[in-house]
Amino acid sequence: MTRKSLLERSRRAVWHPCTQMKTHESLPLVPLSRGEGVWLYDTDGRRMLDGVSSWWVNLFGHCNPRINDAIAEQLETLEHAMLAGFTHEPVVQLSERLAALTGHALGHAFYASDGASATEIALKMSMHAWRNRGETGKSRFVSLAGSYHGETVGALAVTDVALFRDAYAPLIRSGATVCSPDARAAEPGESDEDVAERAAQALAHYLETHHHDIAALIVEPLVQGACGMAMYHPHYLRRARELCDRWNVHLIADEIAVGCGRTGTFFACEQAGIWPDFICLSKGISGGYLPLSLVLTTDDIYACFYDDDVRRGFLHSHSYTGNALACRAALATLDIFAADDVITANRARAERLGAATRAAFGDDPAVRHLRQRGMIVAFDVDTPLADFSTRYFRAALAHEVLLRPIGNTVYFMPPYIVEDDDIAHLVGGARKALDAALRP
Ligand SMILES: *Cc1c(COP(=O)(O)O)cnc(C)c1O
């Protein structure tokens, strides 16, 4: 199969996600042939370092032998069976191990396949839990400015990214948006923590007047990814927890992007020393191999549904709920976390990634707000170029790096196996790409 015909056939038959397909008249698709570790290879054998972990999902590299072996073994045993009325070892083990990772604060796991479905589940469970308690008025949700929780119609109600929302406005039952604790909003003399406190006061004010209608506050803990890696102080999460308790509102932590060690702890919420009522996980949980998402919740919420009456149960399902292959990939992923003490090893790795980025970009007058939380490093580029993101993407590919800026925000979110030479390649390529992208 020649490269050219693969691209032609893809353009004709495949509708690519998050894409105006007409742009591919001039911007060629990248035809991939294989992946190995941090590298992806195109059909001409050219390599590129996966600097965004393939849309934030990959943790331990492509074609990781340990995850491959686990999936292959599971494939010989049980590939999939319905989870209503049935159960199996991988789904039980995974639920037990995730419960243990929360210190059994959130001991019940409900499964789906994609991140947006996990958001839908958390929203439905929250509202239904209040209803089962007789609080029928609590059916609205609060989210942060710039929030992203997925793109299904329900999830768009708590997603504040105009580009993804506006066309579907008539379908969406909008929730309320409160001020984001994004540290970039600091006034002169204000610390990150001050900004977080200011945002918490806005939340306090909102909940004080509207708590009767509100089922839950949903947040992306510590890093709001899709709006451009907005980072904030953990103080906000502590205050959000207090305020939700005070006004009888659930706290949903969407850890789909920030969970699984991405911010430096297994769950981002750990850095604030709090547990939410719901945690949504997806993306990295299967190591970036298979579509798997889940919602963890507490004994209290679970008890609201436990009854002789069927209608008080949570009657939600997806065909692939608890897929055995995906759960097995997740178990292999958790095995790697434990065996390699990944959270500890990542501390030094993140330090090196941050230092290399500061050395390459710290003094650049076009670079603003260079920031880091664990294995996410980001900065904003001051440029009037409307097509900066596409120019940068192309320029980075020419230097064997896969990077997709969000607007003018360039970010690195590599797999947790980047070694020093990979970091040098990633940051060095990113530096040359910036020079090329800004050149007139
Ligand atoms: C990616 C993402 C989602 C949606 O997950 P999908 O699997 O793409 O549906 C939801 N929330 C956050 C924070 C995300 O980053």
Image: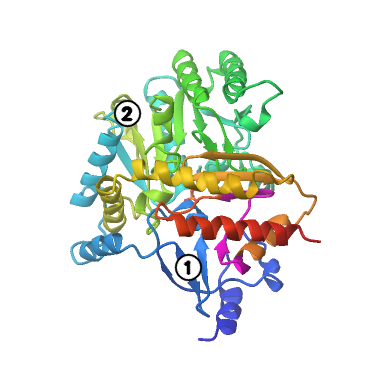
Could you tell me residue 143's position as x and y percent?
Answer: 56, 31
Count residues near mark 1 (Cα–Cα under 10 Å), then give few for <14, some for 14-19, many for 20+: many
One can see residue 165 in this view: no
The residue carrying mark 2 is 298
State the SS at label 2.
loop
Residue nearer the viewer, 305 or 381: 381
Dividing the picture into quarters, in which one does residue 62 lie? bottom left
State the SS at label 1.
strand
The span from disc 1 to disc 2 (Cα, nearest Å) is 40 Å
Q: Amino acid at mark 1?
A: Leu
Judge from the rendering whether residue 56 lies leftward or rightward of residue 381; answer left or right: left
Residue nearer the viewer, 367 or 102: 367
Given this view, does label 1 or label 2 mark the residue nearer the observer? 1
Does residue 185 lie above or below 51 as drawn? above
The residue carrying mark 1 is 40
Q: Amino acid at mark 2?
A: Thr
Range covered by the magenta-colored residues: 397-411
Judge from the rendering whether residue 439 lies leftward or rightward of residue 292; answer left or right: right
Could you tell me residue 199's position as x and y percent?
Answer: 61, 22
Could you tell me residue 101's position as x and y percent?
Answer: 29, 36
Could you tell me residue 201's position as x and y percent?
Answer: 60, 16
Residue 401 in the magenta stretch? The answer is yes
Residue nearer the viewer, 174 or 345: 345
Dividing the picture into quarters, in which one does residue 79 lie? bottom left
At 21% from the left and 45% from the top, the residue drawn is 93
Count residues near mark 2 (Cα–Cα under 10 Å), then give few for <14, some for 14-19, many for 20+: some
